[in-house]
């Protein structure tokens, strides 16, 4: 097994030990000649012979079983119905093949100190870097940190009258790499209907997140305005039906997803908030290089939907609890379009990826998104203004090493 596969197994070791159903694997492992019968017996006797002890020994021994050991192991997982684990390993294995080291390190030499006089939302105004203080910052020490689900809707049904979102695969690829590098288990689901989106989100919420520190949901789709109480907007399934952002967030509340209670739940939404195009206003420091000459950006806008709340969604509720430990990042201000270029992807995702690359090692999530908003607001002839709803209780620093 090469070093990349070995590192991938070690990164997901805790998840595999917790979730692996080893008793269903023995026949599949033998049929693919991953292990000999006497090796299987040794694994079954490992430790106290418990399922966890067997899973732990299986992962350890797998590292010595040749260059095709991991692909064969993934096939065994699929054969025995352990598709969630197979998908996580397969997605991250494919992603890491494209992780190319940067030739130039754009990060500053030393982290910037926190201003003692600057009181962030929930930071108590304490001096010094809060990253290592559990009272000021969320703990992000588990390996992996958590699940990251990316829903990438590109192709829409003819009945929906929604255009193909050319360039969205560029966004999806960047975010796969980025969140994988931030120690998340990344899964990608492509071209889901509204009902399928709800089911995928509900399945994620129902997993056991007790050994993890965070959860991330990314949605790349067309969007629209929608009636709301707390979180504005809706995103479209490929069948043309909208899914309210409030309902998406509510799937992960403390009642529906107790194992994420007290842990940060992050949502990144690349979709239009409406049909308005922002012409901006004149300022003295416009950067000409940001206007991308020759580009032809598209929007993800669709009309306002009065009935966005009436469509029957998975886990729909009549009221929402007070949100906590939730952060929702929008690519654009509610009511306005969000721009996407066919070759480079969306302005929002391209900028977010660049900012995270340069600053995630030293700055908290809110500071990172302020940088994203400032950079995106300077692009193009038409303007775009990202924003976020922050209901986190502490600062959040991603795990970068």
Image (cartoon, grey):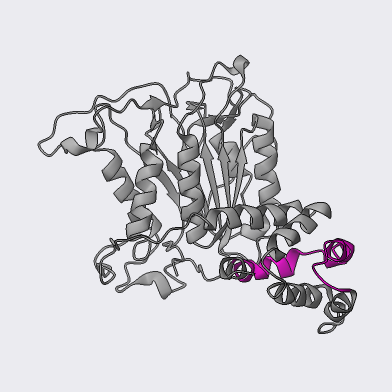
Residue 130: where, in percent of width, then height? 37, 71
Residue 100 falls inside the magenta stretch: no
In this picture, residue 377 sits left or right of residue 154 = left
Residue 165: where, in percent of width, then height? 49, 28
In this picture, residue 49 sits left or right of residue 106 = right
Q: If the image is split into quadrants, where does the N terminus sit?
A: bottom right
In this orientation, which residue lies closer to the viewer: 13 or 1?
1
In the current view of this chain or complex, which residue is farthest to the bottom? 47
In this orientation, which residue lies closer to the viewer: 221 or 3?
3
Q: Is residue 93 above or below residue 336?
A: below
Residue lying at 38% horizontally and 40% vertically, measured from the top left? 348
Residue lying at 28% horizontally and 68% vertically, measured from the top left? 114
Residues drawn in magenta:
8-36
Residue 10 falls inside the magenta stretch: yes
Q: Is residue 327 above or below residue 68?
A: above
The image quadrant that residue 394 belongs to is bottom left
Q: Count every numbered label the image shows and give the total.
A: 0
In this orientation, which residue lies closer to the viewer: 141 or 119?
141
């Amino acid at each position: 097994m090469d070093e990349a596969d070995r590192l991938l197994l070690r990164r997901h070791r805790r998840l595999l030990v917790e979730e692996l159903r080893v008793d269903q694997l023995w026949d599949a492992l033998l049929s693919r000649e991953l292990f000999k019968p006497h090796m299987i017996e040794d694994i079954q006797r490992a430790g106290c012979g418990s399922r966890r002890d067997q899973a732990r020994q299986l992962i350890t021994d797998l590292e010595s079983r040749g260059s095709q050991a991991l692909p064969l192991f993934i096939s065994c997982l699929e054969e025995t119905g352990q598709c969630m684990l197979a998908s996580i390993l397969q997605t991250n294995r494919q992603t890491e093949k494209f992780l190319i080291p940067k030739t130039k390190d754009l990060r500053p030499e030393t982290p910037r100190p926190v201003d003692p006089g600057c009181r962030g939302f929930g930071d108590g105004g304490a001096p010094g870097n809060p990253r290592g203080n559990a009272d000021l910052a969320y703990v992000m020490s588990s390996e992996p940190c958590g699940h990251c689900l990316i829903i990438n809707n590109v192709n829409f049904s003819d009945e929906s009258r929604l255009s193909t979102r050319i360039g969205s695969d560029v966004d999806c690829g960047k975010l796969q790499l980025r969140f994988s590098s931030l120690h998340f288990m990344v899964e990608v689901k492509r071209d889901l209907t509204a009902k399928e989106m709800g089911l995928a989100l509900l399945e994620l919420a129902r997993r056991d997140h007790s050994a993890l520190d965070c959860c991330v949901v990314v949605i790349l789709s067309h969007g629209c305005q929608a009636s709301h109480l707390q979180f504005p907007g809706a995103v479209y399934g490929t069948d043309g039906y909208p899914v309210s952002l409030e309902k998406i967030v509510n799937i992960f509340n403390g009642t529906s997803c107790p194992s994420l209670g007290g842990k940060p739940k992050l949502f990144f939404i690349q979709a239009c908030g409406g049909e308005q195009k922002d012409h901006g206003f004149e300022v003295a420091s416009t950067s000409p290089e940001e206007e991308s000459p020759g580009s032809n950006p598209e929007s993800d806008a669709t009309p306002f939907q009065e009935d966005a709340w009436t469509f029957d969604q998975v886990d729909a509720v009549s009221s929402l609890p007070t949100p906590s430990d939730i952060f929702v990042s929008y690519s654009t201000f509610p009511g306005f379009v969000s721009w996407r270029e066919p070759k480079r992807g969306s302005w929002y995702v391209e900028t977010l990826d660049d900012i995270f690359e340069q600053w995630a090692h030293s700055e908290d999530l809110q500071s990172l998104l302020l940088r994203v908003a400032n950079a995106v607001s300077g692009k193009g002839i038409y303007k775009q203004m990202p924003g976020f709803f922050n209901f986190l209780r502490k600062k959040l620093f991603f795990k970068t090493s």
